[in-house]
Amino acid sequence: MEEILIDLHVKKLIHTTNGDELLELKLTIPRFGFITFFGKSGVGKTTLLRMIAGLTNPDSGYIKVNNEIWFDSDKKINIKPQQRNIGFVFQDYALFPNMTVKEHLLYAQFYKERGYVSELLEIFHLKGLCERKPAKLSGGQQQRLAVARALARKPQILLLDEPLSALDNETRTILQDEILLAHEKFSATTLLVSHDINEVVKLSDYIYVIENGEINKQGCPKEIFNNTKFQVLAQVLKIEGTILTISANDTITKIEVSEFEIRDLKVNDKILIPTKIVNPMILRINTS
């Protein structure tokens, strides 16, 4: 039986493009899980992360982490953000312009564990950039630093608010691998907000779909996306190693699949691929 780390039931009036809407979420999250909150813009995904972090207060309800009350409207308990053992990666990176890469990590480090900063620099390929300040880093390097800094304090919970949305496809794919490696290596419980179906499928153990102010659907990636709402039929035009050239909706594109998935495929086969693809290189397909 999975050990529950987060138990929450919160209500919050949020402002959407369609007017005010009551967000009411009740969920539990297992320790060490990689959980994604998925849904349209403005449904409350980021608001949920901010409530867990203590940056936004629920109107009512409770948030318990490891059986400790972080927020309870009835009991008038509200633990300060700096007292919550979390790491938060924002969309805009929020780096300090006057600090070097290494200074960012040392400043954020809560437990001064020898060698831990070096591990982070290694995982996120920042070792050769230790003395550079953010202005001298590429977008991908800045995002690597933002994630590494969030992990520097060894948080119980890592919160990722669409951290890769502004990156190019190649950098995005590499950073996904680095985030997954860090999640597993440092035994974090990771909560991700993402609109990219490929990213969600690749990283997530479990998904909560938020719609109309509530959890509309939940399950593992296969359960959530094995649905025609999220898939489109495509035809295989060419197979080159693990790269497929496909035709879907009058568009020709390339996708990447695993060796296992490509094993029984041949030209002219029909396959199902996720819709709303942000990164055209996908890792999982369903053959028909």
Image (tube, rainbow, N blue to C red):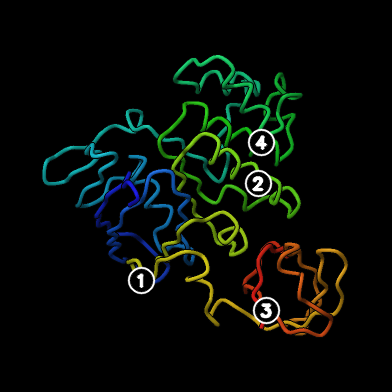
Residue 268 position within the rendered picture, expressed as x and y whole percent measured from the top left: 82, 85
- Tell me the quarter of the picture where residue 115 sits: top right
- Does the CB distance between marks 2 and 1 fall below 8 Å? no
Nearer the observer, 125 or 15: 125
**Amino acid under label 3?**
Thr
Closer to the camera: disc 2 or disc 1? 2
The residue positioned 37% from the left and 71% from the top of the image is 216
Residue under label 1: 212
Q: CA distance from mark 4 to mark 2?
A: 16 Å
Closer to the camera: disc 1 or disc 3? 3
Q: CA distance from mark 4 to mark 1?
A: 34 Å
Residue 6 position within the rendered picture, expressed as x and y whole percent measured from the top left: 31, 46
Residue under label 3: 287
Q: Quadrant of the C terminus?
A: bottom right
First in sequence, mark 2 or 1: give its number.
Answer: 2
First in sequence, mark 4 or 2: give its number.
Answer: 4
Residue under label 4: 142
Give SS at disc 3.
strand
The residue positioned 27% from the left and 59% from the top of the image is 26
The residue positioned 52% from the left and 19% from the top of the image is 107
**Amino acid under label 2?**
Asp
Q: CA distance from mark 1 to mark 3?
A: 32 Å
First in sequence, mark 3 or 2: give its number.
Answer: 2
Residue under label 2: 177
Give SS at disc 2.
helix
